[in-house]
């Protein structure tokens, strides 16, 4: 984990070698806001080659763009040479860079609140872009012309939303208008970068505000049109007094407490099947929206280049979320299988947030908590009493009947009608091997 003491040692070493060096970017913003920085970046007059001479362990992957990463104390510290960028080559990287002084370096950065330098030796803040004033005004504003900054890197439009949501700032008027006009350009950003920035919005405080801003700026329809489609989809007011599906989703995200990426995506997509399944009968209905949504979630995760493990958990969260509503009606065997879902804690949390963001009743969630406690000292789905080898030993021939018998035995085990291997063997003999046995079970 990064810490200020290690960053200070790196900075001091640069200065001792005769180079100019400052803390830069987000860590300066956070320090001025009284927040512990997540990263400490250093901007310096030293070239990448000079930095690597001082820090032989440095990683030079970004050296041609003036950036070197120094691993120290189990964390990574980014050291960037003061530079001015040439014209953008691919909507992200500049075609060329040239090294310059500190003032010139600041003017290439994205937002004023990220464009300040800090001298930790003297305590002086170097602010040539009005960052301190914008912190006081609580606004996110680009350095220089918004259109130019965003066309240099289209992802900056989404970053503006992230900072505004996380810090509870407004987006400055000209910056906001530029995002509205350039929103379609976000489709040029790679899926991986969009995914990572989206997850940064969804896994921190005020994620619901972030989703609303993505909608208001016009970005959401180009990033996740399936989520944009939730806007205006009415729900039965008895169950959802909060409003449409989009508002319900935003409220869930606001209530979430720094969820995992998988849970965050599960919340975002749990009702994504509702627009396609909405029916107005005796009331508004969304039959099978969980199953439809699970398939849509799988496609969205693939489009965002999520890992297989991430995708499977998100799909499970979306596909299973309605089952938890019926927990009190389940047979014990069905309930125990539900509790045995991988990462069941996330299913439980999604259900809690779903209730809180709608009717507010938590009795079903409390039932599930109590059920989980009942099985705390045993596996919700215990090891099977019998295997196929046991059935062969009883004289049965392998085939489709094997699966039926094993499922039947497990069902009896979960219902606590069978409690030992011997009881299970006797059960199979009675139900499947005795004269006149039908195999239907009791």
Image (cartoon, grey):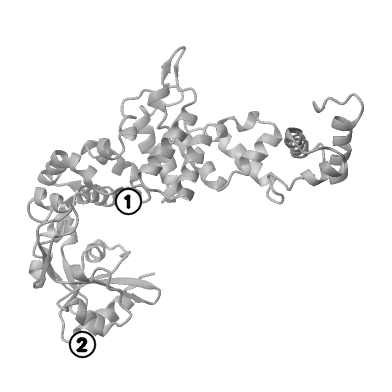
Is residue 250 visible from the viewing direction of this image? yes
Disc 2: which residue = 16
Q: Secondary structure at mark 1?
A: helix
* Residue found at x 12% / y 41%: 177
| Residue 419 visible in the snapshot | no
Q: Of tags 1 and 2, which is closer to the observer?
A: 1
- 39 above or below 287? below
Percent coordinates x, y for residue 10 in the rendering:
27, 80
Q: Position of residue 263 (x, y in %)?
A: 45, 46
User: Marks 1 and 2, how far apart in space?
Assistant: 39 Å
Instruction: Indicate the position of residue 211 as horizontal and vertical percent values.
Output: 30, 41
Which badge, 1 or 2, comes first in the chain's sequence?
2
What label does residue 192 carry, if any?
Answer: 1
Residue depicted at x 39% and y 43%? 302
Task: Quadrant for the N terminus, please.
Answer: bottom left
Residue occupying the point 64% across, 28% down: 329
Q: Toward which corner of the image does residue 266 lie, by quadrant?
A: top left
Asked whether, in this view, residue 41 is left or right of residue 250, the answer is left
């Amino acid at each position: 984990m990064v810490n200020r003491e290690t960053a200070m040692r790196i900075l001091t070493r640069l200065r001792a070698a005769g180079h100019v060096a400052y803390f830069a970017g987000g860590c300066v913003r956070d320090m001025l806001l009284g927040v512990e920085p997540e990263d400490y970046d250093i901007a310096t007059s030293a070239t990448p080659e000079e930095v690597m001479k001082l820090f032989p362990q440095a990683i030079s992957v970004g050296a041609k763009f003036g950036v070197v990463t120094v691993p120290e104390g189990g964390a990574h510290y980014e050291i960037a040479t003061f530079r001015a960028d040439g014209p953008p080559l691919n909507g992200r990287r500049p075609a060329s860079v040239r090294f310059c002084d500190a003032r010139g370096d600041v003017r290439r950065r994205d937002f004023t609140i990220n464009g300040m330098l800090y001298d930790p030796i003297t305590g002086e803040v170097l602010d040539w872009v009005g960052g301190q004033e914008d912190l006081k005004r609580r606004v996110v504003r680009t350095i220089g012309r918004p259109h130019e900054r965003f066309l240099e890197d289209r992802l900056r439009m989404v970053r503006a939303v992230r900072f505004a949501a996380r810090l509870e700032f407004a987006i400055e008027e000209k910056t906001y208008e530029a995002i509205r006009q350039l929103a379609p350009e976000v489709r040029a950003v790679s899926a991986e970068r969009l995914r990572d920035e989206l997850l940064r919005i969804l896994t921190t405080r005020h994620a619901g505000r972030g989703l609303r801003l993505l909608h208001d700026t016009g970005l959401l329809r180009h990033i996740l049109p399936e989520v944009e489609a939730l806007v205006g989809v009415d729900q039965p007011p008895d169950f959802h007094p909060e409003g449409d599906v989009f508002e319900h989703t935003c409220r869930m995200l606001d209530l979430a407490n720094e969820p995992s990426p998988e849970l965050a995506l599960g919340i975002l997509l749990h009702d994504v099947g509702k627009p396609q399944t909405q029916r107005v009968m005796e009331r508004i209905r969304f039959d099978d929206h969980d199953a439809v949504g699970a398939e849509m979630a799988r496609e969205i995760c693939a489009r965002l280049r999520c890992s297989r493990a991430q995708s499977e958990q998100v799909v499970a969260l979306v596909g299973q979320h309605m089952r938890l509503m019926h927990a009190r009606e389940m047979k014990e065997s069905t309930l125990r299988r539900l509790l045995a879902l991988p990462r069941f804690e996330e299913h439980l949390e999604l259900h809690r947030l779903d209730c809180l963001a709608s009717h507010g009743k938590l009795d079903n969630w409390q039932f599930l908590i109590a059920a989980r406690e009942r099985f705390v000292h045993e596996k919700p789905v215990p090891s099977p009493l019998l295997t196929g080898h046991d059935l062969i030993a009883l004289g049965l021939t392998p085939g489709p009947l094997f699966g039926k018998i094993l499922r039947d035995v497990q069902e009896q085990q979960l219902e606590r009608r069978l409690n030992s291997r011997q009881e299970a063997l006797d059960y199979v003999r009675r139900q499947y091997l005795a004269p006149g046995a039908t195999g239907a079970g009791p």
